[in-house]
Amino acid sequence: MRDEISLRTRVAIFVLLGVIGPAVLLVGLNYFLDTAHTDELLQERTETQAKVLAAGLSLPLWNLDTPAIQEQLDAFRSDRNFFHIEVADQERSFVVKNNPFDHEINKVFRAHADVQHNKKAIGQVEVTLTDAPDHQALLERMREYLVLVLIQSVLSFFIIMYVMARRVHGPIERLVDEAGRMAQGELGQPVQEEQGIEFGRLARALDVMRHSMKRSLGELDAQVEERTRALKRAMRQLVESEKLVALGSIVAGVAHELNTPLGNVLMVASTLRERIELLAVDYRRGALRRSTIERFVSEAEDASALILKSTERAAKLVTQFKGVATDQASNRRMNFDLAEVIDSAVASLRPSLRHTNVSVGMEIPPGIRVDSYPGALEQVVINIIMNAVTHAFAGNIGSVRVTALPPTDGRVKLTISDDGIGMTAEVQARIFEPFFTTKLGQGGSGLGLYIVHNLVTGILGGELTVGTAAGQGSRFYIEMPVSAPRDPLPDQ
């Protein structure tokens, strides 16, 4: 709360308290001293009047002369502080009172005196005075004095604040504006000189700081530009390395898949060669029979069928790998069928997925034509699926589904979802950051989804969002135009 109060307001409060506070205290102290002095004088006067009245009532009270006593009591009624007088004999069988005035009582002062006759006490008189008139007059005086003090304080306050605004607040605000301008990077204009020794020194110090900041900012800009170029080069190299790692993984899977058809071809070819050699031996010996030729023809037909099937399987694997590898190795733009490209990407992963408990399914209607970059799209699909295999299932049984809807408003929506462990909010907030991985030291590079994000938002010209929760799987939503931008971002 203190930080929200400006210096001007604080100074105004302190000045107001410093001017009015002492004045009010002086008025209060003066009132207290005057009241004490008035009370002291009234007490003395009360005691004096009691003694004077006691001396004058000696004979009337001895004679029990009520009219004479009343006459003397009435003489005191002219006193503006008069409140009450009572005269009584010793036994209080004879009492004369003077009724009090009907006015507000603030404080009363009482005094008693013995009435003597021939040096013998015959009665007592009690005199009571009030300070109400004096108190009222004192209050009126204090009010007038207080009004004068307040007028003087207010005038002093405004004079002081005017001087402060001209000599203090104005220079401070101008220097604050200069500092704000420097903080925003506007370092070309020099700091204006201020009047006064202190503010002048501060203005010169700010100008020296401006020169230093301008020089340091120039050096820093050059360093930042050089570091940025180096960082971009390093990131491009890392991205290319990650692409090669992904291709290497596909190559390993394809090579493993090729072992079966090529092994079958080798085995059948070897067996067929042995049968031919046996047939040649029988022919040279003249022991060739019709049944032997028929059996050889039958075995040769089976062998050729198996060789043809195995070579077709190998050729298909090589064709799929060649297409994926060529697309990912080049950023060529072409018009393609979305389902065919994604099916090719998924097919290239099947050899690697065969040794996991993860299945991949597709639900993409045929005929969705896209004018874009198939290599980038294939890499996006491959990276997201492999990210799910690595992080979402951790060796458990699971499935990944790739779905798409027909284009609307020139944009196609692609969803890649899994039924894995999902992600926490903290992980979801950082999954597209470079080098962020939950498998640090366990084969995770932290670049897979970073590359995905750059490809989708860059070369494909789309948007990438994630919906996930712990224990509820993950869903990657890709929305991209059916016609990619002609000039993708160069750094992607």
Image: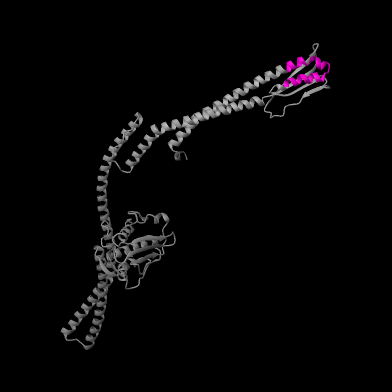
Figure quadrant of residue 463: bottom left
**Residue at screen point 32% across, 59% down:** 457
Q: Position of residue 484 (x, y in %)?
A: 29, 64
Name the side, left or right, on which 359 lies relative to 487. Answer: right
Q: Position of residue 116 (x, y in %)?
A: 79, 14
Up-down: is 445 above or below 358? Answer: above
Q: Is 162 included in the stretch rendered in magenta?
A: no
**Residue at screen point 70% across, 16% down:** 48
Up-down: is 462 above or below 298? Answer: above
Q: Is 55 included in the stretch rendered in magenta?
A: yes
Up-down: is 23 above or below 396? Answer: above
Q: Position of residue 55 (x, y in %)?
A: 76, 14
**Could you tell me which quadrant the C terminus lies in?**
bottom left
Figure quadrant of residue 456: bottom left
Q: Residue furthest left?
A: 284
- Picture mark count: 0
Up-down: is 57 above or below 304? Answer: above
**426 or 124: which is nearer to us?**
124
Name the side, left or right, on which 438 lies relative to 53. Answer: left
**65 or 349: which is nearer to us?**
65
Give the residues drawn in magenta, as a range: 50-76
Name the chief secondary structure element in magenta. Answer: helix
Name the side, left or right, on which 131 lies relative to 143. Answer: right
Q: Position of residue 102 (x, y in %)?
A: 72, 29
